[in-house]
Every structure is written in structure tokens, then in C-alpha cells.
Image (cartoon, rainbow, N blue to C red):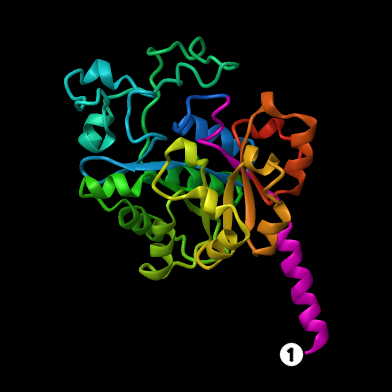
Amino acid sequence: MNQILISLIFIFNTACASKKIIIAHRGASAYLPEHTLEAYSYAHALRVDFIEPDLVLTKDNIPICVHDIHLESTTNVEEIFPKRKRSDGRWYAVDFTLKEIKKLSVHEREKKSKKRVFSQRFPQRKSNFKVPTFVEFIELVQGLNESTNQTIGIYPEIKAPEFHQKNKKDITKVVYSIIKKYGYENKNDEIFIQSFFPKTLKRLKAEFKTRIPLVQLIADDSWGESTTNYSNMMTRGGFKDISNYADGVGIWLTHLENKSLSLEEIKNANLLVHGYTHRPETQTKKRLNLYKKLDGIFSDAPDTLEAK
Ligand code: CA
């Protein structure tokens, strides 16, 4: 290959790598109840680059869009099915068929943080938002892409694969088959797949031979997200290991602000860095500078993000 061509490829790759992406976190969740078709539509109208659905399975193995493996934080399940909680007092999505889940209405989290109480808007427990399926989500995004002539991508998160396995369910297999069916297959397709579970991402590569870019989410060990040791992940060796099976990391902004963790170190491991989560009330000057250095940002309110 001649030298000019090599240089051109390098410039092209650098230009592609430097495009910062904005990911609508749970849809435009600062404005509408998270993980509803309304929140996804609004995110699309805000012209984000990607829209994020979190996925769990129903009893009949249908991936639905909700953040938690249980339903009571964002739906009225306790009113509709008062007797269907487990002994720990929680209503699990895997215990309900899709037909049953469609009877529920979605509401805002009662308290998202100390600064944000959303219970007054979209009159709590009166509005008729529904839990969408993953298929409904994809068809919405692809339909809007066609009607608005855009190429907004999807950024699905495979939730709690170990929990699903304990309940005799293979969420990774079900979700991946839908992703393929809807035409997402290659490295440059408008999709990332994310998970907190390294085993799940490694399996997508080894068993499903995926070419889709994968993002390793990194939690704080204190959250008890999984049995993974995330502190070990956030080291030079840890990032190098991740680069063997993933294309990027999704990292908590607070971890990035911690001086012991260097952004350069992650980038040196050839990993994209997507930070979570931008919210208007935590958009400090210091954070704005941080956002500028990232390859992507998850945001609840993408229209207020000034770092593009
Ligand atoms: Ca998520």
C-alpha cells in the first residue's frame, strides 16, 4: 500500500474516532417517564446520536424496556397484581407475561434524587404510559429514522444476565437474535451493545461472533451490580484486558473525576470512553471540561449538554 493511502486511512480513522456521541439515557428521561415510547420519541426529536433501552425478559421470554429487574419502582404493578410479589416483597418482570405487563402503566420514579422529585408532573399513577418491548423500541427508532431521514442509533443494555440465568432464561441469546433480525450486524452499524457483565460481552464475541461494537460498563463495587470486581477493571491491566473483547467502556463520571484514574490510560488501551450520566443540575464547569474529552456521554437531557 502506498504511503499516501496509508496516511489518508489514518486521517479518516482519526476523524471517525473523534466524533463525540450523545446517548439519550433511558430515552429523554429528564422530560418524560424513563423507558417509554414517548421518552424515546422525544430523544429522537432532540437529534441525539443513540437512544438507550435497558432490557429484561418477561416470563414468556420477550425483552422489555425497563431499568430494573423488578417492576414496582416505575409501574403500578403492586396495584394491578397485589399478590404476585416474591417473598422479598418485590415484583419481578420474569414472573409476568407480556400480556400482563401490558396491563401496567408506567410512572416516574417517585424520587430520582434529592434534587429532583418528579411525582407532580404527568399526574402520578393517572397517566397512561406503557412498558414497551424491545421490538417496539427498534421499530419506533427505525420508523422515525425513515420519516425524518436520520440514522439515529440504538444502544441496548443487557441487564442482569446472571439473574436471568438463575431463572432459566438466556437474555443474551434472545436479545441478540432480535438485534440481528432488525439488521444490526456490522461494526459500522448504528449500534453499541452494553453490559456490566464481562462474561456476556465475551460470549457475544466468542459464541455469537458479533462484529457489533461492545461497551463494558464499569460500576462502583459498592453498588453490588454483580460479582465482578470493578476496582480491578479500572487499572492499566484491567483496561488492557477489556480491550481484548470490547471496543469501549461506559464509566461513571465520578470515577473519571477521581485523580487515580487517568483518561489517557483508558484511551491508550484503545478503548472508547463513554461517560454516565449527564444531568443539567450536575453540569458544573469542571464537568463540562471533562465531557469535552470523552468519546460519548449518556444524558438525561441531551439538549442541555453544551460539550459537543
Ligand atoms: Ca442503562
Asked whether, in this view, residue 202 is left or right of residue 10, the answer is left
230 relative to 132, above or below: below
Asked whether, in this view, residue 283 is left or right of residue 113, the answer is right
What residue lies at 54% left-to-right and 64% top-to-bottom? Answer: 241
Quarter residue 208 falls in: bottom left
Query: Any magenta on residue 204?
Result: no
- Return the residue at label 1: 1
Residue range of the region highlighted in magenta in the rendering: 1-30
- Farthest left residue? 83
What residue lies at 67% left-to-right and 43% top-to-bottom? Answer: 256
Foreground of the two, 289 or 63: 289
Give the residue type at disc 1.
Met
Is residue 154 visible in the rendered structure shown here?
no
Coordinates of residue 81 in the picture (x, y in percent): 21, 21
Foreground of the two, 30 or 269: 269
Asked whether, in this view, residue 70 is left or right of residue 305, the answer is left
Quarter of the rendering occupied by the C terminus: top right
Quarter residue 62 falls in: top left
Element class at badge 1: loop
- Farthest bottom residue? 1
Foreground of the two, 269 or 174: 269
What residue lies at 34% left-to-right and 55% top-to-bottom? Answer: 172
Is residue 6 visible in the rendered structure shown here?
yes
Coordinates of residue 267 in the picture (x, y in percent): 69, 59
What residue lies at 39% left-to-right and 43% top-to-bottom? Answer: 55
Coordinates of residue 51 in the picture (x, y in percent): 54, 43
Query: Any magenta on residue 23?
Result: yes
